[in-house]
Image: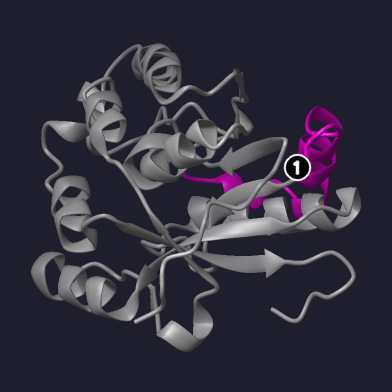
Amino acid sequence: MISPSPVPAFETMTIVCAHPDDETFGLGALVTAFVDAGTRVELICLTAGEHSTLGAGDGLATRRSDELLCAAEILGIAGVTLHHYPDGSLAGVPVHELAEEVATAASHTHALLTYDHGGITGHPDHQHATDVAIAAGRHLGVPVLGWALTAHVAEQLRAEFDAPFVGRDDRDLDLAITVDRSRQHTAMTCHDSQLQSNPVPHRRIELQGALEHLRELHVPDHDSR
């Protein structure tokens, strides 16, 4: 088991994610750990989640946008940029186009935070957002950290939910951070449209306990991932 480390020290950090709720269901506890450590955290979300199968209906994009702002305030995210690229078809937008937009919006940032390769759940939008974050990080010359699951947690989730969760062995994990999940749990209630019929986030957090893991997806001047 990888030993817990202090929260990395960054003056500013920008989250790059695909959908409203990614910042909370996945990254919420890490976000509050960085905020509590003194990092100014901002968010770039690439879609409004309008084609979600968990909560469909007229006005879903507006509803999920409002949910995102609610959660961001609870987590302590200082600024939110919400794009309206096509939910479910984000991979159809070239990486370089999205990366240029992210790099321009995050030109002041000292690090980027996104999902691990594979997008944790295998969702194509998640995977594309990760590729975008790495490309933007290379352009900006800043580290890109990827939220990761341990192999054990991913294996258990695959068995219980028959979904393609991606996990990593200890040798592939770079950081373990002890987290307080209280604000994450509160922020999750903001995303009511996605939580009511979705038991996965609570079960995943139960399996993870008080630890979150990160991979270094890009290290300036030394990118071997």
Image quadrant in which the N terminus is located: bottom left
Residue that mark 1 sits on:
98
Magenta-tinted stretch: 88-110
Label 1 sits on what residue type?
Leu
Residue 122 picture quarter: bottom left
Q: Residue at x 40, y 62 (%)?
A: 120
Residue 143 picture quarter: bottom right
Q: Position of residue 64 (x, y in %)?
A: 38, 20
Q: Position of residue 93 (x, y in %)?
A: 70, 46
Q: Main secondary structure of the magenta part?
A: helix
> Neighbour class for label 1 at 10 Å: few (<14), some, many (≥20)?
many
Q: Position of residue 123 (x, y in %)?
A: 42, 57
Asked if residue 44 is positioned above or below residue 124 in the image, the reply reads above
Along the horizontal axis of the image, is 104 left or right of 49? right
Asked if residue 103 is positioned above or below residue 2 in the image, the reply reads above
Q: Position of residue 145 (x, y in %)?
A: 61, 58
Image quadrant in which the C terminus is located: bottom right
Q: Mark 1 falls on what kind of element?
A: helix
Q: Residue at x 23, y 25 (%)?
A: 186
In magenta segment, residue 109: yes
Along the horizontal axis of the image, is 216 left or right of 28? right
Q: Depth check: 141 or 83 in front? A: 141
Along the horizontal axis of the image, is 40 left or right of 196? right
Along the horizontal axis of the image, is 210 left or right of 71? left
